[in-house]
Image (tube, coloured by chain):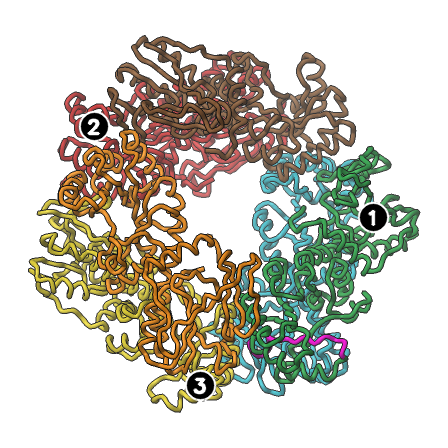
Chain colours: A brown, B red, C orange, D yellow, E green, F cyan
Amino acid sequence: WGVLAGIEECAWLLASLNKDINVYSMKEGTVFGQLEPVFVIEGDYLDFCVYETALLGFLCQASGIATKAARCKKIAQDRFVISFGARRIHPAIAPMVERSAYIGGCDGVACVKSAELLGIDPMGTVPHALILLLGSSVNAMKAFDRIIEQEIKRVALIDTLEDEKFEAIKVAQGLGKKLYGVRLDTPKSRRGNFLELLKEVRWELDLRGFKGVKLFVSGGIDEPEISKLNPLVDAYGIGTSISNAPILDFAMDIVEIEGMPIAKRGKFSGEKKVLRCPKCFKRKIFPKYEKNPKFCNCKAGYESPLLPLIKRGRLVRRLPEPSKIREYVLRQMEFYRIGDV
Amino acid sequence: WGVLAGIEECAWLLASLNKDINVYSMKEGTVFGQLEPVFVIEGDYLDFCVYETALLGFLCQASGIATKAARCKKIAQDRFVISFGARRIHPAIAPMVERSAYIGGCDGVACVKSAELLGIDPMGTVPHALILLLGSSVNAMKAFDRIIEQEIKRVALIDTLEDEKFEAIKVAQGLGKKLYGVRLDTPKSRRGNFLELLKEVRWELDLRGFKGVKLFVSGGIDEPEISKLNPLVDAYGIGTSISNAPILDFAMDIVEIEGMPIAKRGKFSGEKKVLRCPKCFKRKIFPKYEKNPKFCNCKAGYESPLLPLIKRGRLVRRLPEPSKIREYVLRQMEFYRIGDV
Amino acid sequence: WGVLAGIEECAWLLASLNKDINVYSMKEGTVFGQLEPVFVIEGDYLDFCVYETALLGFLCQASGIATKAARCKKIAQDRFVISFGARRIHPAIAPMVERSAYIGGCDGVACVKSAELLGIDPMGTVPHALILLLGSSVNAMKAFDRIIEQEIKRVALIDTLEDEKFEAIKVAQGLGKKLYGVRLDTPKSRRGNFLELLKEVRWELDLRGFKGVKLFVSGGIDEPEISKLNPLVDAYGIGTSISNAPILDFAMDIVEIEGMPIAKRGKFSGEKKVLRCPKCFKRKIFPKYEKNPKFCNCKAGYESPLLPLIKRGRLVRRLPEPSKIREYVLRQMEFYRIGDV
Amino acid sequence: WGVLAGIEECAWLLASLNKDINVYSMKEGTVFGQLEPVFVIEGDYLDFCVYETALLGFLCQASGIATKAARCKKIAQDRFVISFGARRIHPAIAPMVERSAYIGGCDGVACVKSAELLGIDPMGTVPHALILLLGSSVNAMKAFDRIIEQEIKRVALIDTLEDEKFEAIKVAQGLGKKLYGVRLDTPKSRRGNFLELLKEVRWELDLRGFKGVKLFVSGGIDEPEISKLNPLVDAYGIGTSISNAPILDFAMDIVEIEGMPIAKRGKFSGEKKVLRCPKCFKRKIFPKYEKNPKFCNCKAGYESPLLPLIKRGRLVRRLPEPSKIREYVLRQMEFYRIGDV
Amino acid sequence: WGVLAGIEECAWLLASLNKDINVYSMKEGTVFGQLEPVFVIEGDYLDFCVYETALLGFLCQASGIATKAARCKKIAQDRFVISFGARRIHPAIAPMVERSAYIGGCDGVACVKSAELLGIDPMGTVPHALILLLGSSVNAMKAFDRIIEQEIKRVALIDTLEDEKFEAIKVAQGLGKKLYGVRLDTPKSRRGNFLELLKEVRWELDLRGFKGVKLFVSGGIDEPEISKLNPLVDAYGIGTSISNAPILDFAMDIVEIEGMPIAKRGKFSGEKKVLRCPKCFKRKIFPKYEKNPKFCNCKAGYESPLLPLIKRGRLVRRLPEPSKIREYVLRQMEFYRIGDV
Amino acid sequence: WGVLAGIEECAWLLASLNKDINVYSMKEGTVFGQLEPVFVIEGDYLDFCVYETALLGFLCQASGIATKAARCKKIAQDRFVISFGARRIHPAIAPMVERSAYIGGCDGVACVKSAELLGIDPMGTVPHALILLLGSSVNAMKAFDRIIEQEIKRVALIDTLEDEKFEAIKVAQGLGKKLYGVRLDTPKSRRGNFLELLKEVRWELDLRGFKGVKLFVSGGIDEPEISKLNPLVDAYGIGTSISNAPILDFAMDIVEIEGMPIAKRGKFSGEKKVLRCPKCFKRKIFPKYEKNPKFCNCKAGYESPLLPLIKRGRLVRRLPEPSKIREYVLRQMEFYRIGDV
């Protein structure tokens, strides 16, 4: 399965052409399955074929990122997942990348501009540089605490100059109840049994009365790390695995010419209907002109996720806010498992 | 090793700041090794720290793409390698992606705009759509041949509606000597032993007097496919593996503060010198203030690839054309092997 | 477990000797387990020892083939399984091979002579040669349809000259309702994801109103392929894996000499009784002279599958028809699983 | 590579048809490579197509057996390899199986009739039964020695009732200098580290002055066992792995119709020439009507292994004795390695 | 988990020092889990630090052996497990090794002295040497039977000079009802499928009326062998895998200094409490000064396995007999599985 | 191969018996091969059989430890290897364990008593406890430096409370030129890429002028770790892998009785001679009474490493000092590789 993203940009592009075309698509954020058409264009091929590369580019990269974000969030469950990977991709697409990460399920993003576009607060911690400049994590956190408004949570980075265990104790004793969390961005050369290290930090904090301090981790986090560290972690900062996620390889194929189904080898010809049960999320694909069941085995009436987007060249659907799309994704994700196809 | 790309954008950004900083960097296209600093900024940290995300973004993604392109070209040797993957990434970065692919070693790119920016001709073949619309590959190629100027090479796509073997025979017999090549974009479900299929197409073409017709392949091509198909293939169209290449994870670390070496755990402190032998391309890293050998074991005098880029805020180096960078990469690649670190 | 075959030939050989021997054996088609004696000869060793090689030869090869056929049929369930492998073994044993395949569970055989001996109709499709000679699958099927009696089912071979998808559409549209099935004997070089190819052919046929046309596959089919392709296949043509099946390595061992148990190292001495529950098919082996339970845990009375075959040199059991043996095998197979020992 | 066998039976069948056909084939025993045609029939397709199953059956099984025998012999080098597997296949094909094993390189066969047809002496040892009946290996060997003519070598089976080590010592001390060899047919349950057991038997025989007694092994011997046991073994008895060898899957394909090359998907069209260097055994395949090099890189003039067999329906080649074919195979095998394709 | 052993020696050493220290420890034989403190010393560090090497040595090796013995016994269930490995370790520690094996769960030990110290009878069988000296197993067993008191069970070693099957039959027929068991110490070179060999010996004994004769095995026995052979074996003799068992790597760490928790990196600071449910054996670790639940989820009241051992330098706990410790281990083992952590 | 140890204890035991026996043995420290007899006793079996367990115990454990030490030293080459594992085994055998480790090739041992018995200085570093008690590594090293005599090398433990990198810098700057080395006993949870960590520590020390400070590592070191860390490490502290090394499983077998060769199944009968070339260290085993070559292929005259140890009950060989044995081992080790048998 994948999470569909990039629809908004496709819609604006096609609506701007002023051509007599009809477009149907699934809603942005829809979880779709193998072989399902997600975006259907009807019209004179010459009116839109030159935009194939752009349209595929909008969908493939955004959907790849949204899908990876959804998988990470699914595994992390109610733990925070924050997109930290803007620094790994060209700044021109940082807003697109973080929007896709957010609608896929990330709870926050690190980039100020992206957050602004999404209408949310950016998230992050102090940088290693501040600690190096001020000489220690405690100094850095105290300075931060003096200057930064109180709404911002105090999260200390504890892997810069000292061992995580002692750094954690020091910042906790230094900031006291103001400390919201500690972040371990532990370098590879020191990251042996990371779960054991987290246990130790947790133990030492608890022992000294800091049971409320959260544990944040970052650095090379992907699906397997999340499964493994969940027992102790409260929040994940995820970089490259989301921002450089594998794209989804959509193709834009002709499947009907003037009403006659025809498709190249390897593709299924004819326009299709997708049915989805709104209750159990089971799905089926039918030729468009075939009759099909009205009701799922679970008794619910099927819905068709392929909806009109553009009619005779004009946009006919309201494009939702990122936060609404994100909610829609999270709602659907309850019905999917990581290993599903 | 990796191929450095993205320097030009970094240079313009930093030069536009009008701050009193000095920057040293390797030249765009330099092949660098593990632990080597490629970009050094001296100055007041507050003058540039806010651009960390943008600078890393320029370097990480472009270098990742250039490196993958260089690896593919290295394996393909004198066979053509064309970047086909613009359709897999957001159109806003297509020129950056194809520029990086080109300087890494690709012989051509598919996107018209990108090619224009690079000062080269775009490359491609007829699309599957043309064949579907005109009913057969032969029809499509004949129409193409009638209309398109003669400088453009005639490359037939032969996997759309019929088996590659018979399609190859038909287009060869249809176009005769005008046919430059055939392209197999064979779908996954039909791609069994691809090398055997290529052998068969080659045999049938040769048998009928078409020994000069080239074999192009595309679809899911990456390093292992290239190694395997080299005996029969004349040109590769490479998509996702180049345009969605794994980024290189550069970090922007403080290593000296007012002359004192200091670096966070996991990083080597102090400014560094990199020495490179211009003859055998062996490399060494030294602390900047340490004396070091003038000559390599192979007797050549060492050069230092870290050169001034910006002095006191002003650009001091001429930034070369993409085609010059590409030549520089190819020249260096002769000294590296795929398995080197 | 294995399926016992070859008993009939052993019986005729031993009965022809006119020697004072007694023979007990399991019935042809009996599913037997590890260590169970299947064939017991009592008499003067010199009267029969010279036939050891022949007797083992009858049992080992026939039982190997019947066992493999039973495994394939077990996995294919109610889908057709046809023995296509006569061309892989010497013609002198083709009837034995196909008889063994049939009693093991195959639904049909390809060889005319073998089928005649089994009292069934041979099965097959048009050959590739007919299509090559008449120029296309449609031509070949039309010629076949004109000439061959109507009882014979029309099954088109669709992998000869064109892609399976388009060939399927053409023969379906050419023959219309007369078309019974299509057979994919897809060559290795084109057999990528075979299940996907089958899905595509199924889709295209269904889309055009040919939901009743069956899918036959052949070429390199063995147990794993059957498990994988079952969702879409209606009939399997199985060649080498049945006709060249691994033999079962029976041995002919002395276990008693004049009433004294004695056996070489590695063999269990003494004559044995095998008990089999007719209800749950659980089995036990006992020394012949030991008392043993009359009833299985499931309350059914045990039966002994080792029955008199020859008494004092004369055949005392009626040897059943192949079709009866086959039914007996299929009845037993319901109680076994592929992974049983 | 494979060793071609079954040509003689094909020749007699086709020569008996009295049809106007020409046949070219490689000589029986020729080592051929991938894609090489080994048997070419020219004529009216209806004159011979009904024999396709029989012709393939002759070639596939015999060549499979000859190839496996050649591989085993290649690995065993100058050690004896005897075909023991007649008991594993139907007696009707025992002569074909053992003829194929012999021409592939076996030094002897166990079956009396097969040996007679091959014009050689059958080989074997006393059976386990004799030892059981006479009570011990020593008794059996002494009886054997009393009765059997002196030309027959005395080889004792030493795994029946006692441990191989002590049985070897006993038969050696019992028969003295007359003992030619001992055979270990050690059962699986006692076959731990077989090489160590052989070392021990060798040591104990040598220690007592029986350095000349040969070590024979049998039971489950195939290529890996031979490689492993070569340091100590003088002769191998090989059963199932040769007589039940995987068949070679030749196909009988149309490649030209009235001078026009045409072949189904997956096959190379047009009649072909195979060239083979008689010195270095390098090989090449060309379309029949193409010019081709006269000389190999090693300066020797190429030969063409495809020679006339039948002209206008009459046999035109003398079919050689099995022993000559065997010599031809062994001569060629010096140029091949087990891992070659 | 591990089985704690070596406490007694630690206790005597520390009690002999006459220093003002307090010691808490788990009872010898306690099954403990990861991270649990098993031995706690309070006092002036200089009073005991010099004994760190000795104390760890007592605990690490003895606990390693006891743990391995417990695992073997757990798998063997009610079959006998006898420690045979004294010959593999220095005689100075044989009593310690066998005591640890015994308390871990072994049913007996082979060493006379060790058995005496444990207050049990030593166990063993006749040696290979006796059989070699008297010429056969039967002779050896008859001599043994004549001379050795009747309380000692007659267990024949049956792998010395003849095959196990025939040796078993001979000693059974020679000693008749007096034979208690047969031991297979089958050498590696003859140990093919050991389970099959055991089945055969069992069959032959049963067939001749010796159903009561036990099967003992020895030689290279470890956990996987036990799991595999359990269906047929009545007793295991285990050597190297117990006496050379991997040690448990306890460390003696400072965790509090004058009431302040402090521990080196990788260790949890502060004194700890371990709670263990006496009913379901679930366990928890808490800082010593933290309040903790009185009752387990299963309603039972928690107990603390860390008990006072030495107070102000004097031993305050009675150290139990080995047989009592062993019972304690076996009682706990019912709650653990081999794969638990 | 293995390194023979434990001979001295065997010699004293047997010499103390006052029995009329002769003993031949290889010298302690001899590197021997598979199947070679290392210790031969001639005499009345009853005179010594009761000591079988003790004699095997002396040889098996000591030789296992010496062999493992030799392997580690072989890989470490001229880097220091120190036996740190006394804390893992019972104190009663600490001297035996460390003597075996030393003669196998260790350069030093940690235990004071063992070192005294070996006539060498014990080796070690400050313990973690000292650092915890004094609050930091620098404090601990300064205290150590004030009090401990100057001959003792100053090696700082740098993993206790802070990160290795910063601790290394601090102790180097604190002790200056007096610092001999730093030891990384890095805990598992922090041991990610250990080689990278070592590189970083090396870089930071070198950068600050401490190129002479050695790097010591300890904690879980075995053969693979040594191979991997050799590029940066100057000394290894090896614990469990040497002191708990797998024993060598010698057996004490009867091979001749009154001049007649006889051995149980699995053993080679008869007394044996071992020949060893003093130049190329090739080896051969012969029956004692067989003639054998005087000279090796490399022209050197063979020597026999089995030499008289006890004649008629009295010790006839001088038993060498541990340091001499160690030299002998190291000399031989030049001729062996880790992978030899």
Question: The numbered mark 2 sits on a residue in which chain?
Answer: B
Q: Vertically, is A316 above or below E25?
A: above
Bin the neighbour count of mark 3 within 10 Å (Cα to Cα): few under 14, some 14-19, many 20 and up. many
User: Does B171 sit left or right of E40 as displayed?
Assistant: left
- Left/right of residue E252 with respect to residue D335 in the rendered view: right
Majority SS type along the magenta span: loop
Asked if the residue at tag 3 contacts the one at tag 2, i.e. Cβ–Cβ closer than 8 Å, the answer is no
Chain under label 1? E
Q: Name the residue under label 2.
A: B153
Q: In this rendering, which labeled residue sits more in front, label 2 or label 1?
A: 1
Instruction: Count residues near mark 1 (Cα–Cα under 10 Å), then give few for <14, some for 14-19, many for 20+.
Output: many
Disc 3 element: helix
- Mark 2 neighbour class, 10 Å CA radius: few under 14, some 14 to 19, many 20 or more: some
Q: Mark 1 points at which residue?
A: E25
Left or right position of A71 against A36 = right
Residue found 74% across the figure and 49% down from its top: E250
- Chain that bears disc 3: D
Which residues lie in the magenta part? E150-163
Element carrying mark 1: strand
Q: Residue B230, position in %: x, y?
A: 30, 41
Asked if labels 1 and 2 touch by Cβ distance under 8 angstroms, the answer is no
Residue A188, image x, y percentages: 59, 35
Q: Which of marks 3 and 1 is in front?
A: 3
Image quadrant where residue B195 sits: top left
Which quadrant of the figure has residue A165? top right
**B83 inside magenta stretch:** no
Residue tagged by mark 3?
D140
Do pointers 2 and 1 mark residues of a single chain?
Answer: no
Where is residue E98 shown, x and y percent of the image? 75, 63
